[in-house]
Image (tube, coloured by chain):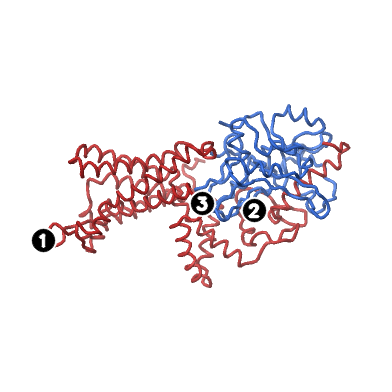
């Protein structure tokens, strides 16, 4: 039989990648009114984004097909959408979005340098993405408002929205938006780099591609972006074309690296919310009692799901002849205890009493 | 730099005197600063002062890593199963519940699983893990096979454990009596009857070798 070139999982992931890329492509066509507001100078960014979309969707769907991920993806949605708890879940979702994602509360608890670095980089990148992508895709463009040259009107998907003076506070906040983003990213990268160069726990496990490259890329994007501003504001456009190309190269490389490196955690991390709702549902439901000590140690739902996941992965912790049918029904403490007792019994049975 | 291939962690819970030096020393390790990864358990606190330390056994096929939905737990090429990667861990608790040895610890506030990583900042430089440097009874010992054979002439190390039908091989070795005929430790043997004698079961070597489920040795990076 001829071997299959693609596994079932790979095929699904590839199709998902193609579908996501097409969706973004269609959104660009619609949002830019059939490319009438599309800036041809930014076409490199667009194609890098489309490639990144394919890569991210492909990796995301491959990841979702791992047995444990598939289980919690399914369960997370099930418990979130339960009609009897949907209202409460929605309120909790808003609260958790604020504390977990917007404030990064759990990262600050891991250490203030780590928290500050992540918070600054995250908000800098969010701000920069919110400005860059709609501009690149032609979803937002600006036109002079009225007959004068001192007011702009923003158009979103071709529809007119707010108008503001170039010298107004809003103009001051909006037009140099990417400068503000770089002011967040650069100190964040500095703090992260400091930790990477000084902390022994990071020194021992970090690698260039996984840990340093994303920081270097974010730094390069921010600095070259600032150099563009310096060039046209204070140096009469000195070396502007060279700087524009350099900046484009750094941004495009960052976009291309999104599906491969550490930055992919941006797309995995929302799973944390699903887990929190899964834990809520587990705490409200039936608890699993340890088959040995009879104390509750986890939710029954969690244990049953874990047994199923282990079987899918090829593990056989089944206990065919015993007071319980599966090793998973033993609490972690009793597992530790049983291991020590098993060793202890060997010594007791041994003619040599002293080890 | 990988952990030297000729160095092993040998544990002998039977020798533990409950001094908790390992627990304190563990907190000084840079890879889990301020947090002790050792479980120091009492066998039966009402009946006996007997304690035993539990460190990660660093399985060849780590269940904790396989059941992780976030793919956050990695085993380095030298066989050390690392703590959850911080950007990825979503604190689902799967690893804590799945580990056959009951090792990982969940730090809910930080949304992070942490576990014994054999003090990787030290062991990858050829130094001993913190706990092994302070254990006065050498219930936790780190060194070469020759060293342990010299120190423990009446013991020998094994690294095969059975949990129901599942066989797990580990990087960390457990000391058993040299005269004992066992090739592995069956954790279920003493689970429900603390006084039950261990069953000497060496069928693995014989015709029923396929009766237990062995997993391939995996290495993830």
Q: Which chain is blue?
A: B
Percent x, y of residue A159: 23, 63
- Secondary structure of the residue carrying numbered label 1: loop
Q: Position of residue A149 (x, y in %)?
A: 13, 57
Q: Are marks 1 and 3 on the same chain?
A: yes
- Against B22, residue A280 (above or below) is below
- The subunit carrying tag 2 is B
Looking at the rendered structure, which numbered label has been put on residue B97?
2
Q: CA distance from mark 1 to mark 3?
A: 57 Å
Label 2 Cα crowd, 10 Å radius (few <14 / some 14-19 / many 20+)? many
Comes first in the chain, label 1 or label 3: 3
Task: Tell me if A258 is positioned left or right of A168 in this view.
Answer: right
- The correct choice, above or below, for A207 with respect to A290 in the image is above
Seen at 72% across and 44% down, the residue is: B20
In the picture of the structure, the residue carrying the numbered disc 1 is A147
What whole-number distance in Å separates the C-alpha atoms at marks 3 and 2?
Answer: 21 Å
Please give the residue where the numbered disc 3 appears in the rendered image.
A65
Locate residue B62 relative to residue B46 in the image: left or right. left
The label nearer to you, 1 versus 3, is 1
């Amino acid at each position: 039989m001829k071997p299959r070139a693609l596994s079932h999982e790979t095929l699904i992931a590839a199709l998902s990648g193609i579908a996501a890329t097409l969706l973004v492509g269609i959104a660009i066509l619609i949002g830019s009114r059939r490319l009438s507001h599309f800036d041809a100078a930014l076409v490199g960014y667009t194609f890098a984004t489309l490639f990144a979309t394919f890569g991210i969707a492909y990796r995301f769907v491959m990841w979702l097909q791992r047995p444990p991920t598939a289980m919690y993806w399914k369960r997370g949605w099930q418990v979130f959408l339960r009609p009897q708890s949907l209202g409460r879940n929605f309120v909790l979702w808003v609260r958790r979005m604020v504390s977990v994602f917007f404030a990064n509360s759990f990262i600050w608890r891991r250490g203030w340098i780590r928290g500050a670095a992540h918070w600054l980089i995250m908000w800098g990148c969010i701000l920069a993405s919110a400005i860059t992508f709609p501009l690149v895709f032609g979803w937002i463009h600006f036109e002079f408002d009225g007959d004068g040259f001192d007011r702009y009107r923003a158009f979103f998907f071709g529809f007119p929205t707010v108008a503001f003076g170039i010298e107004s506070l809003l103009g001051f906040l909006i037009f140099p938006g990417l400068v503000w983003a770089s002011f967040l990213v650069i100190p964040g990268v500095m703090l992260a780099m400091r930790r990477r160069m000084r902390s022994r726990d990071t020194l021992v496990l970090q690698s260039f591609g996984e840990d340093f490259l994303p920081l270097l890329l974010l730094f390069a994007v921010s600095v070259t972006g600032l150099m563009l501003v310096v060039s046209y504001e204070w140096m009469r456009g000195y070396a502007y074309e060279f700087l524009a190309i350099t900046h484009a190269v750094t941004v495009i490389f960052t976009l291309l690296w999104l599906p491969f490196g550490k930055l992919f955690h941006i797309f995995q991390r929302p799973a944390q919310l699903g887990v929190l709702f899964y834990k809520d549902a587990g705490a409200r439901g039936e608890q699993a009692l340890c088959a040995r000590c009879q104390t509750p140690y986890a939710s029954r739902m969690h244990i049953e799901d874990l047994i199923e996941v282990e079987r899918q992965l090829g593990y056989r912790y089944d206990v065919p002849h015993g007071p319980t049918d599966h090793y998973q029904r033993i609490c972690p403490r009793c597992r530790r205890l049983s291991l020590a007792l098993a060793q202890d019994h060997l010594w007791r049975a041994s003619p040599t009493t002293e080890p | 730099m990988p952990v030297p291939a000729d160095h092993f962690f040998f544990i002998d819970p039977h020798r533990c005197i409950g001094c908790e030096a390992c627990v304190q020393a563990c907190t000084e390790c840079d890879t889990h600063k301020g947090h002790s990864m050792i479980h120091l358990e009492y066998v039966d606190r009402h009946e006996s002062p007997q304690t035993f330390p539990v460190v990660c056994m660093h399985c060849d096929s780590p269940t904790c890593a396989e059941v992780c939905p976030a793919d956050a737990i990695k085993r380095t090429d030298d066989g050390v199963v690392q703590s959850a990667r911080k950007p990825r861990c979503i604190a689902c608790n799967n690893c804590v519940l799945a580990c056959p040895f009951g090792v990982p610890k969940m730090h809910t506030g930080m949304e992070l699983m942490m576990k014994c990583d054999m003090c990787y900042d030290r062991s990858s430089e050829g130094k001993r893990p913190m706990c092994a440097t302070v254990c006065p009874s050498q219930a936790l010992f780190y060194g070469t096979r020759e060293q342990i054979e010299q120190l423990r002439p009446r013991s020998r190390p094994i690294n095969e454990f059975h949990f129901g039908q599942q066989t797990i091989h580990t990087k960390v070795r457990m000391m058993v009596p040299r005269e004992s005929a066992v090739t592995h430790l069956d954790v279920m043997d003493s689970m429900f009857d603390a006084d039950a004698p261990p069953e000497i079961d060496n069928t693995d070597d014989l015709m029923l070798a396929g009766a237990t489920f062995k997993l391939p040795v995996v290495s993830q990076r």
